[in-house]
Amino acid sequence: MEWYLPLIWAALIGIAVAMYVILDGFDLGIGLLFPFAKSERERDQMVASIAPFWDGNETWLVLGGAGLLVAFPVAYAVIMPAFYLPVIAMLLALVFRGVAFEFRHVAQTSKVYWNVAFAAGSTIAALSQGVILGGLIQGIKVQNNAFAGGTFDWATPFALLCALGVAAGYALLGATWLVAKTEGAITERARIQGKWLLLAVLVFMAIVSLWTPLQFGRIAARWFSTPNIYFLWPVPLVTLAVALAAWRWLETGRTVLPFFAVIGLFLLGYLGLVISIFPYLVPPSLTIWDTAAVPASQIFMLIGTLFLLPIVLGYVGFVYWIFRGKVREGESYHH
Amino acid sequence: MDLDPVLLARLQFAFTITFHIIFPSFTIGLSAYIATVEVMWMKTGREHFHRLGRFWTKIFAVSFAMGVVSGIVLSYQLGTNWSRFSVVTGNVLGPLIGYEVLAAFFLEATFLGIMLFGWNRVPPALHTFSCIAVAVGTLISAFWILSANSWMHTPTGHAMRNGVAIPVDWLTVVFNPSFPYRFAHMVNAAFLTTCFVVFAVGARYLLAGKHLDEAKTMLRMAVGFAAIVAPLQLFLGDQHGLNTLKHQPIKIAAMEGHWDGSKPGDFHIFAWPDEKNEQNRFEISIPRGSSLILTHDPNGLFPGLKSVPRSERPPVVPVFFAFRIMLAIGFFMIGAALFGALLWWNGKLFETRWFLRVMAQTWWIGFVAVIAGWVVTETGRQPWVAHGILRTADATSPVLGASIATTLALFVVVYGVVFSAGIYYMNRLIAKGPSDVAEADQTPMLSPLSAAHDAGRAALAAKE
């Protein structure tokens, strides 16, 4: 009866990570676009559009980390030391950008520093996450269920490519969020930025899609062997269709639709990664079953999750509804 | 260069977790305080309660942000620095932390959004509800994380299989023997810590002759609350100590500087524990004091440090002194609270300026006591990370000492900057005071907020 529990948990953690990437993705994206704002009022407007949400968004990151510890402690214990430096760089960057929300609000002359902290923190966090993603796809050296590689194993051209790709993706989410939530000059600029970023993201997706099967035999086998290829060929086509829709909606002045199209794009990219990696949690050696916690732990947490997760989703939705609508220029972050 | 990864990992974790605990100690109490004044505002309709709620919410926001970001760090550091600990205890501790995230963090983070930004978006009742939700969230969070921590001190409800702890009975895991005591002691400590911050701010305003309504309310609330909670803390701490004596007697021996278990223990007001020669120097003691406290019998015996080999003892000096710092602050708080209550009773609380001057300066004592208390319990647990299950030295990650040293330096720099800025900004918000908050809201000239608020309303109305 034990084989399906790790599957359920892999799905749940997959959902948590997807929620994180989309939700914190757009608010990290605001940080990435911060240097392109033209005035302090615009920056205030950008921050105001995410201020009530960022803390909740980042909680999904904690859930991802804690969930990994709960359900796959061995994977947690391999992945964290393997990406020691990028993980800590990400954490420190998140510290800076997190406090910058509050500090730039109360700061006067020092506000400019917190603007920099917010932009730089968001950028470093996004790049670190991309490096970790790339490093995970490449694989981690494991012996006796423990990390056995070197300090800089993750530092490869492929990981760098993934870092840029993730940053471009977050910036795209951020731009479409601004299109949905702001008004004025900032919105128009975000539409243009969104189009460029959309192109960049597609290029990155294409390179990763070509690079991974060429370099990693296991990924090529997954996609191009029969019968897999019969089921998998629509994935890139649907991705392209969604990207086209996003482009059209950006061009035709739709407010909310571009954001949802980009979420769709993210989910498809995510699906592609899952197809490439599954059932490995620590490629190329440890599967979700190799790293799973004992059933007693997975069941105990599952009961709580089935009860609590719908409630969490309920009030997260509630807050987005309370703060629905656009943030106008000059409407500042206040409490 | 030969860097000891165990020592560095411990230093790094000690640094990040000490930094972190400052903020929950404050926000647990402050969220409850804000919820209280908002409820009083709703019940009495008196505007100064509203101003107090808004004022403290601003400070809460700054403090909570620092607590959140430093907390995220911890949830990943268990893996980056203590991966073998994660493997050995993950099956038991993972779900406790998981419950904390799902039951508490989302509740706090979500309703925090309404608490901070919802003043003009939601009706007062919903705002008050959000404050209560955040306060409850902080308590749920404390419940789970203290359960996990307590299990590291007094693990129960598990079995060892292939060197890994496997849960057997969850109820026994969660409600392990030291948990109820630790939970009560820590939550009470958080309330007390916040209480003395409110006390100090009230005293500061009254001395300056500013915000008098708010100052008097804060002083009355703080004195009344502290007069109950500070003595209660002594009782809870004593109970917690007796529990520790039962389960971790060597920690108690270190706290008391008690070497020879064959004799009754004196209470050392001061001493320098000499670990090399296994004795104390420069003792100033109350004869048999420790025996009386711990066994309720002046001739009672309890284990001494010498009853176990050196390798089984925690570092005595930090445990011994941290305990005394905590005690000294605890007794000062009891004295201040009872004296304040006496002054209030005699109608002199607001006139006794020397007392207010002292109290205005002592906002930080609760934080020091909390940190000292954690040093006692965590250092006292050594050499174990999970008592009897895993030694700290065996719990680390396969990471180079140089990596840990580099990131430790970065943590010190980043936290140093963030902490200084945070304290500076909080102090400035306090210096500005509560009345200005409300004025800003009523005077569009001073702030674009009201205008923005109207614009927001109009936008909402147009949408609906």
Image (cartoon, coloured by chain):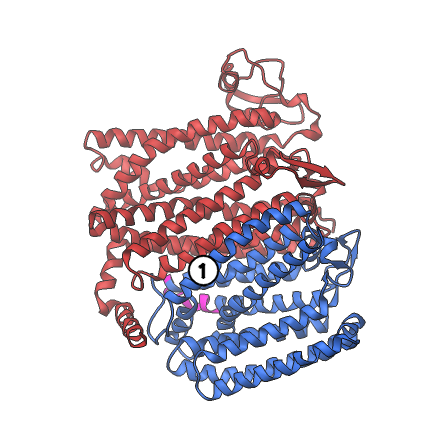
Chain colours: A blue, B red
Q: Residue at x 31, y 64 (%)?
A: B121
Looking at the rendering, the stretch of residues picked out in magenta corresponds to: A106-116
At label 1, which amino acid type do we have?
Gly
Q: Answer with left or right where residue B183 lies relative to residue A167.
A: left
Q: Position of residue A50 (x, y in %)?
A: 43, 68
Q: Name the chief secondary structure element in magenta.
A: helix
Split into 4 quadrants, where in the image is the C terminus of chain B?
A: bottom left
Magenta highlight on residue A107: yes
Vertical relation: B190 (above or below) A202: above
Residue on which disc 1 sits? A314
Q: Is residue A99 visible?
A: no
**Which chain is home to disc 1?**
A
Q: Position of residue B134 (x, y in %)?
A: 40, 51
Nearer the observer, B197 or B397: B397
Q: Residue at x 74, y 39 (%)?
A: B161
Vertical relation: B347 (above or below) A107: above
Q: Position of residue A232 (x, y in %)?
A: 70, 77
Nearer the observer, A227 or B451: A227
Number of marks in picture: 1
Nearer the observer, B417 or A301: A301
Q: Position of residue B42 (x, y in %)?
A: 24, 50
Report the residue that reaches farthest toward the top.
Answer: B299
Vertical relation: A240 (above or below) A70: below
Q: Secondary structure at mark 1?
A: helix
Vertical relation: B280 (above or below) A245: above
Magenta highlight on residue B196: no
Q: Residue at x 65, y 83 (%)?
A: A237
